[in-house]
Amino acid sequence: MRPQNKVLLFTLPWLVFLLIFWMYPMIYSFYLSLTDFQLLRGSGKFVGFSNYIRLFQDPVFLKSLQNTFYFVFGTIPITTIAALILALFIYERIPGHRFFQATYFIPSITAMVVVALVFYNLYSRDGYIFTLCKLAGLKPPQNGFLQSEDTALLAIMAMDIWVAIGYYVLIFLAGVKSIPTELFEAAKVDGAGFFRRSLHITIPLMKSTFIFVLVLNSIRSFQIFVEIFVMTSGRPFNSTLTTVYFIFDKGLQRGDIGYGSAAAYLLFIIILIFSLMQFRLISGREHSK
Amino acid sequence: MRRCGILFLLVILGCTQSQRPSHVIRFWQFWSDINTKPVIEQLVKEFEVQNPGIKVEITDLTWANGHDKLVISFAAKDPPDIMELGSDWIAEFSSNRLLAKFESDLPDNFLLPAMWHDSLYALPWLLDTRIFYVNVDLLRRAKTKIPNDWPELFAACIKVDNLGEDYFGFGCNSAEKHRLYKKFLPFLWSNGGDVLSRDGKVSLLAMPEGVGALDFYLDLCDCGIIESQTRIEEYFREGKVGFVISGGWLLRRLKKTPPEFQYQLLPVFRSGGGTGTSFFGGEFLAVHAGSKNKEMAKKLAEFLTTRENSQRLCDAAGFGFPPYDSLVIDDADKKKLAFQLKHSKATLPTPLWVDIEQDLEDAIEAAMYKHGTAREVLTKASLLIDTKIKANLNAPAE
């Protein structure tokens, strides 16, 4: 057998899987987004791009987009920077690094539903966080953090940062360890401390890791759903409604699968553009150097 | 030896063949806790014994996503033969001609949620209503008495709320889907208002009765705590809330509290006093119109909804009533619930209910979070609902 055929043969199971469970649903959902398909009716007629036009006129969808962007831009920088600092702490064996090494990954391996339920209680009026705020002399929202429009999304973002950091620490740690140790040793001989080594060696040499973390983190943040589903269902007053929850609500709960598919495709395009921009931004800087 | 082996194999296969059920009925239902699941299994077993050749396959659903799973199963053209439906969901399915018709001589009021175009599409299985629960001890400490009308209720809530920052007059539901409207409807109906006109073609929410009811509900929220249903009930059991509106399941939990905890059930009253109208909902059994085992599935639905079998489910669940009149009840609190059930009604069956419900809940939520007055939010909701009704009426029949 020719080598190309062998490759094809061995990748065939995955290709079949990809076509049936990945490509077909993607193409079919695009077709659905151009129809007024209702789940219970089981049929729909072609409506062109009217679902997409409707989306831009729907204040609830626009609110969900706004919340999603707020979530993405609010969490990604903090998660990325905190994960990088923790990874450097662990790599440089700074005092206390063993504690971080032992604990940082625990939130990431805990089921999100469990985490969300725990935080739901922590944020409630008689929860620990509420009580701690009161003890510290702060004035937490009267009915708890998740019942206030001003704090509900922020509370979920804070929880999400806590959950996500561990995973990105692991990726950054792998990135740091791939840098030749001779560079660090040479810098040490030249008298460079932890900050200078990080600034001039570690961070510049981890460009691909940064891209990976940013893209992964962006996709994950744009697709936030479980936290919202468990903790608020998009409430109060749509202040925590994210785009994926909007898609779930319209498409599955209300059976308006055409409209839901259009929203899903729009989100897909946004994530695609966002990821390409990140690639460009980081690659562009590299080229200009 | 070899022949003997083949003969033995054939005998075994023959036996297996004869024991294979001729019909398998797929039954999707929501009772999965340790108290109710064994009762469901036992009832199904009894049905199978009475009907040899029928095997019932039970699949458990959860309230979190059961509705979605049912919708998807219909979309995938693979729904169960028989399914448990919440009372508000039936019209959504029956209006799409997905459910089989039934006949029943049960009380008309209990059948209303399952009616569509003068036909019955599901059988009531277990019904429950909403009633006030009062913390008598808190009222005593606040030096106030059990209220009889809305002004007295409001005054009592303020006094309880003034007991300290850990005490709340009223347990006000946060904007929880499918729950918030059930807490508001008793006020709306007891104030003479309604969501829709009798023919279901016009929204009545913005009428003075509706605005008055929402204004009063907001007043109660201002001297209470806004939280999820589960947490409100926890707060009530911890003795922190003066009044909550809840169903029979709270009574089951309260029976387990220490005897020092003094509570009382109080039927919903009208604004000026006198018996009001509460919300009733419940579990219904429906059969897929296209099921190959339609008649047997209907037979199972009829078997499960007999007075005796419904009662067995209610006993196991610890709440709810069979959908029959003249029930024998010993417990004083349950008698109050049964009284309230008689003075309750269901929402008008309409395929648009899921949307109408959301518009109503959005309106209540908007007013709770000060995004408009009761009149403004209900006027907006009415306009939205009227638009949807008109669009639905003008939609060409499939």
Image (cartoon, coloured by chain):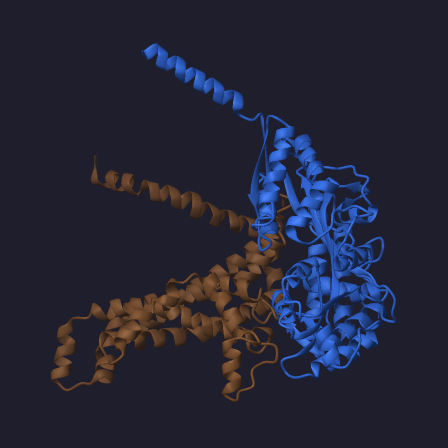
Report the residue at 31% width, 77% height from top: A85
Question: Which quarter of the rendered picture does the C terminus of chain A lie within?
Answer: bottom left
Q: Which chain is blue?
A: B
Quadrant in which residue A16 is drawn? top left
Quadrant in which residue B96 is drawn? top right
Chain A representation colour: brown
Report the residue at 63% width, 34% height from top: B46
Determine whether B218 is above or below B300 in the image.
Answer: below
Residue A25 locus on image (x, y percent): 48, 47
Residue B209 seen in render: yes
Q: Left or right: A153 with respect to A17?
A: right
Q: Nearer the viewer, residue A211 or B215?
A: B215
Residue A197 locus on image (x, y percent): 21, 81
Q: Nearer the viewer, residue B274 or B206?
A: B274
Number of numbered discs present?
A: 0
Q: Nearer the viewer, residue B191 or B373?
A: B191
Question: Which quarter of the rendered picture does the N terminus of chain A lie within?
Answer: top left
Q: Left or right: B202 with respect to B322?
A: right
Residue A118 locus on image (x, y percent): 49, 68
Report the residue at 53% width, 25% height from top: B20
Determine whether B142 is above or below A253 in the image.
Answer: below
Quadrant in which residue A274 is drawn? bottom left
Q: Nearer the viewer, residue A133 or B163?
A: B163
User: Which residue sits furthest front?
Assistant: B259
Residue B95 seen in render: no
Residue B284 locus on image (x, y percent): 70, 46
